[in-house]
């Protein structure tokens, strides 16, 4: 059917066309048009949810030559891993546009155009099945984000933007060398030159000792993006300096590119290296360190955005643990936490942005007693914080629970330590919540703050709906993830331990 | 078209682009001797130069179209696609330089139309270097090019910096030429010939791959070429000379001179040194030193022009990686050369637009806020910087990618890793340019008042930037062309078997 054949291409081209069209209308209309473009993009992507066949493997494929001399193809496809990331992206972009409505006041056209170009880059990363195309997309999303942080960011934006760029760039260039080495190795074995995902994956078994170094190159690229402790230091700077929409997209989607890279490339390409005892021990240790360290550092942050940034390090530590545990539940849990983190942390950043627009500060101590003057914002913040902590009934619980169950079978000690991370999450978010919305309303600046406007309600409502939906009825999500998770586990680990069955 | 070079009419045909260029350059010289007073005369000379370049390009095209090739082994001048493609690159670089010069010369008060004949003579030398099949022809070409460029570097007589640049370039260049010539003499002593193919044959048939005399000759030759391409540690002259020379000439030096020297080096390495020992290790060492040295020192530059000078040193390092990969690297070399030429010329043209009189005074921070007042120029400079950085979507990426493939395919993973790591370093000086333009406020409302480009320069800039993007997005045509080109370089010479690595890159399958 036409939709199935062209939808992924359309999703990539539409935002670019939209970005160009912003320059055809008066600057004041840019945001309205951008909202329209991103809503259409979301509407285009929604049928994927129904048309997707969980057991069907790669779907919605398109495969045409791009640079035939090098065996480079424009090859797209979607499976149970990428489906949700694509939907998450198209879901968050219109909200980001709406959330930037009053926040972005200078050079609006440029901002929304970059946001749309960024959309193409992010979606491209998730649907590319040609490693050249993947690499190009991986880099393409870097530039818009760099500008978004650097032009519309806070006081220290230049430093944060450059740091963000350099960290990602180091990793991605090392990955580039590894991709080329894989390409030449496969060509040497078969005589065929191709960057095709499936083709390269079939020819990684006989790499020998080089495999470790290639894995290491991919690992560094993805671990920086995740970010894994100790490569996370770019994240607090970038998050704090970025404008609201930048933080939301950064936390919601960009971090997922790292974990997606592990699921899609690093693990299936180099299963033997990834599951060798040394690498396993290192990754699991770093994940657990990330969970606890991120939580503890978040606890002492005076700045709300920085607190949320460090909480991301902890959440992504859970994801990494789930991925490396490689049981069907833990991988499903990891996928779900990736979505949840996008929703909950995205919502937290929106709320932080709304508070900032009112008070021009993000320091927790500047607030207090807001529940009295802004009951709607207080309610939203409470629900979102609870979901980020992982309270049962919210999305956060389902994902982390699945990871912990799945991982316990393989790494009991690490899982027990990780579980304390859930408690730590309560220890940093609940006091923050208390400082912002409870406590006495002592500061005079806070007494006249207006509650959520209609626009802000429109931003938060969809996020709250999804938080509760996944929390109460995760079945449709899990059903679509399960075959992909199972396939991954079987590819990487042909014989899971008996305890799993 | 098969040419027998021992026959004069065939030799003339083989040399037709160079012959035509010589005649027309002399015509332009006469023209400017006759009219050389006003700005209109200057423009006329510029137009005549463009016509000359067009005619020469057509002559090259005529040879290429007729599939000209040599019967037997070429003496003196090569007739192969490698020469033609490099000629086109050189002609393109010269044409863009002329377009960028129109207004620059008038603005700087350099109303001396000798500029254009000198440019043409330098180009003639370059084309002889690119096609030289004999060390003597290469040397003659190199001298013709160098002498013309010495004068061009000091063309702004009123500027002390320019004079300093010319003198420095002349002294060090003469020194380098001596090295080169001495190397040629030693190689002649070892093999009894200066013809490239025969040198290769003699080295294998006499079994002298490790003869000290030959190795010393090769070493001296590499030193000479190292000076011309500004490879570390022979780069000391480059920043000062690039800084002092008139900006369009700096661009021409950074692209044309370098391209010609690299093309000659490539031909020498592939055809003559194939069987000799050790050269590839030496070049690999030069490549590493150049990549690290160029990139690290560029980080410390505040002046945009000096930053670009060091950046062009760094790019010489990347090109040396392609030379190290020899057989596999030659197609990558051509692709990179096209990308680099377009990008670097555009960069210097934009610098010339911003600078008024003292381009070397333009600091990177002086670009602050350019995006607000001159969005088009800022966008162009951003694309240029991203291409220099090797960012996907630009020509620079395709070139770098190809060199990486070549280096890995030829078994030099360490070079590939150093290349990408030094590229990360280069982000540390290319991005601040972008940052200054977009992310810093302009110091005052009139900060960028004089920044404009005239119509020819604007057209040339548009061509360059569109070329950068086109190659970045749809490189197939260029890749196929360079692959076929290099295939002829190997097939006609019949040296691929003796090339150090004949497994070659993917493009040669």
Image (cartoon, helix red, strand yellow):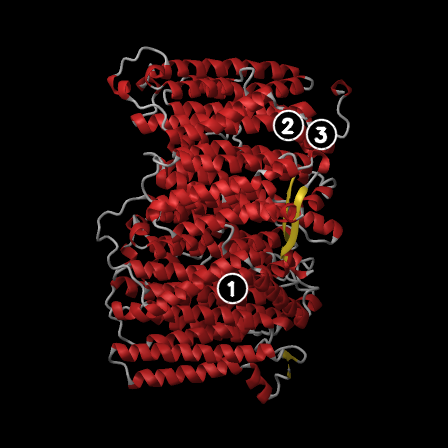
Query: Gap between marks 3 and 1, in whole Å?
Result: 54 Å
Determine which residue is flagged by label 3: A486
Residue count near mark 3 (Cα–Cα under 10 Å), binned few <14, some 14–19, many ≥20: some
Instruction: Give the total number of marks visible in the rendering.
Output: 3
Q: What x and y, as percent, mark residue A253?
A: 51, 34
Label 3 – label 2 distance at C-alpha: 16 Å
Front position among marks 1 and 2: 2
Label 3 in the same subunit as label 2:
yes
Which numbered mark, 3 or 2, is in the foreground of this view? 2
Q: Are marks 3 and 1 on the same chain?
A: no
Residue A250 at x, y percent in the picture:
47, 34
Tell me where residue A242 appears, x and y as whole percent.
Answer: 39, 34
Q: Chain of mark 1?
A: B
Secondary structure beneath label 1: helix
Q: Position of residue A312 (x, y in %)?
A: 49, 26
Give the mark nearer the N terminus: 3 vs 2: 2
Image mark for residue A476: 2
| Residue B430 horizontal side relative to residue B39, left or right | right
Q: Nearer the viewer, residue B309 or A350?
A: A350
Query: How many angstroms separate mark 1 from mark 2 (CA)?
Result: 61 Å
Front one among A65 and B219 = A65
Residue at numbered disc 1: B262
Query: Left or right: A421 with respect to B41?
Result: right
**Discs 1 and 2 lie in a common subunit:** no
**Res B65 quadrant in image:** bottom right
**Label 3 close to label 2 by CB (< 8 Å):** no
A453 w.r.t. B354: above or below:
above
Q: Secondary structure at mark 3?
A: helix
* Furthest residue toward top: A440
Which chain's residue wears label 3? A
């Amino acid at each position: 059917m036409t939709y199935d054949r062209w939808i992924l291409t359309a999703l990539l081209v539409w935002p670019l066309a939209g970005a160009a069209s912003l320059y055809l209308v008066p600057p004041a209309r840019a945001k309205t048009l951008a909202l329209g473009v991103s809503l259409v993009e979301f509407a285009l992507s929604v049928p994927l949810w129904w048309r997707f066949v969980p057991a069907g493997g790669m779907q919605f494929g398109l495969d045409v030559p791009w640079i035939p001399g090098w065996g480079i193809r424009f090859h797209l496809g979607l499976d149970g891993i990428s489906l949700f990331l694509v939907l998450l992206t198209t879901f968050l972009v219109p909200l980001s546009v709406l959330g930037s409505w009053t926040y972005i006041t200078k050079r609006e056209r440029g901002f929304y155009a970059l946001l749309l170009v960024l959309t193409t880059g992010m979606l491209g990363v998730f649907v590319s099945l040609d490693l050249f195309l993947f690499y190009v997309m991986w880099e393409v999303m870097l530039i818009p984000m760099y500008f978004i942080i650097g032009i519309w960011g806070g006081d220290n934006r230049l430093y944060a933007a450059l740091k963000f760029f350099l960290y990602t760039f180091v990793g991605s260039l090392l990955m580039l060398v590894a991709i080329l080495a894989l390409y030449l190795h496969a060509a040497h074995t078969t005589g065929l030159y191709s960057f095709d995902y499936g083709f390269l994956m079939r020819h990684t078994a006989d790499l020998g000792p080089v495999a470790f170094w290639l894995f290491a190159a991919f690992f560094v690229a993805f671990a920086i993006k995740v970010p894994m402790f100790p490569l996370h230091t770019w994240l607090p700077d970038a998050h704090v300096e970025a404008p609201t929409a930048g933080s939301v997209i950064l936390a919601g989607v960009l971090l997922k590119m790292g974990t997606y890279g592990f699921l899609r490339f690093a693990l299936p390409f180099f299963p033997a290296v990834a599951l060798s005892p040394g690498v396993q021990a290192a990754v699991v240790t770093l994940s657990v360190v990330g969970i606890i360290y991120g939580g503890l550092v978040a606890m002492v942050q005076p700045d709300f955005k920085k607190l949320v940034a460090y909480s991301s390090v902890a959440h992504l530590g859970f994801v990494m643990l789930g991925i490396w545990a490689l049981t069907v539940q833990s991988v499903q849990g990891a996928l779900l936490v990736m979505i949840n983190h996008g929703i909950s942390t995205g919502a937290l950043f929106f709320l932080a942005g709304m508070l900032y627009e009112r008070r021009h500060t993000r320091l927790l101590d500047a607030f207090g007693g807001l529940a009295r003057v802004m009951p709607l914002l207080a309610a939203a913040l409470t629900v979102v914080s609870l979901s980020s902590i992982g309270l049962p009934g919210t999305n956060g619980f389902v994902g982390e629970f699945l990871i912990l169950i799945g991982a316990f079978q393989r790494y009991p000690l690490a899982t027990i330590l990780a579980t304390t991370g859930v408690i730590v999450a309560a220890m940093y978010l609940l006091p923050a919540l208390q400082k912002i919305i409870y406590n006495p309303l002592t500061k005079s600046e806070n007494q006249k703050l207006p509650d959520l406007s209609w626009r802000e309600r429109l931003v938060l409502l969809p996020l709250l709906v999804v938080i509760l939906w996944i929390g109460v009825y995760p079945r449709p999500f899990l059903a679509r993830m399960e075959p992909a998770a199972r396939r991954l586990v079987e590819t990487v680990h042909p014989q899971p331990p008996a305890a799993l069955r | 078209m098969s040419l027998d070079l021992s026959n004069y009419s065939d030799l003339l045909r083989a040399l037709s682009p160079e012959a035509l260029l010589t005649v027309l350059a002399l015509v332009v010289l006469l023209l400017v001797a006759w009219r050389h007073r006003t700005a209109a005369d200057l423009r006329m000379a510029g137009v005549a130069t463009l016509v000359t370049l067009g005619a020469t390009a057509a002559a090259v095209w005529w040879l290429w179209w007729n599939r000209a090739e040599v019967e037997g082994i070429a003496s003196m001048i090569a007739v192969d696609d490698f020469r033609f493609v490099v000629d086109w690159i050189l002609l393109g670089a010269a044409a863009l330089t002329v377009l960028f010069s129109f207004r620059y010369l008038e603005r700087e008060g350099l109303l001396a139309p000798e500029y254009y004949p000198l440019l043409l003579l330098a180009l003639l030398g370059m084309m002889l270097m690119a096609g030289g099949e004999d060390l003597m022809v290469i040397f003659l070409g190199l001298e013709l090019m160098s002498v013309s460029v010495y004068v061009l570097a000091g063309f702004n007589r009123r500027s002390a910096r320019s004079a300093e640049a010319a003198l420095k370039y002349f002294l060090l260049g003469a020194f380098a030429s001596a090295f080169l010539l001495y190397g040629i003499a030693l190689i002649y002593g070892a093999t009894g010939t200066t013809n490239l193919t025969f040198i290769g044959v003699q080295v294998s048939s006499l079994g002298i791959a490790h003869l000290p005399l030959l190795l010393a000759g090769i070493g001296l030759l590499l030193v000479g070429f190292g000076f011309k391409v500004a490879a570390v540690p022979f780069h000391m002259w480059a920043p000062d000379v690039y800084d002092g020379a008139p900006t369009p000439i700096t661009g021409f030096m950074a692209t044309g001179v370098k391209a010609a020297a690299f093309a000659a080096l490539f031909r020498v390495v592939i055809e003559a040194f194939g069987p000799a020992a050790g050269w590839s290790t030496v070049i690999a060492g030069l490549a590493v030193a150049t990549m690290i040295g160029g990139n690290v020192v560029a980080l410390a530059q505040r002046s945009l022009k000096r930053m670009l000078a060091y950046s062009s040193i760094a790019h010489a390092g990347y090109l040396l990686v392609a030379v190290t990969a020899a057989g596999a690297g030659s197609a990558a070399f051509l692709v990179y050369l096209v990308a680099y030429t377009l990008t670097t010329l555009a960069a210097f043209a934009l610098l010339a637009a911003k600078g008024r009189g003292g381009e070397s005074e333009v600091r990177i921070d002086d670009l602050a806020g350019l995006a607000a007042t001159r969005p088009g120029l800022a966008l162009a400079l951003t694309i240029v910087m991203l291409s220099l950085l090797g960012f996907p979507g630009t020509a620079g990426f395709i070139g770098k990618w190809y060199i990486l493939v070549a280096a890995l395919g030829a078994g030099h993973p360490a070079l590939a890793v150093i290349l990408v790591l030094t590229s990360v370093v280069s982000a540390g000086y290319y991005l601040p340019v972008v940052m200054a333009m977009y992310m810093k406020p302009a110091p005052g409302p009139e900060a960028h008042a004089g920044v404009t480009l005239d119509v020819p320069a604007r057209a040339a800039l548009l061509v360059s930037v569109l070329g950068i993007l086109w190659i970045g997005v749809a490189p197939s045509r260029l890749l196929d062309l360079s692959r076929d080109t290099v295939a002829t370089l190997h097939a006609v010479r019949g040296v691929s078997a003796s090339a150090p690595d004949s497994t070659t890159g993917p493009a040669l399958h």
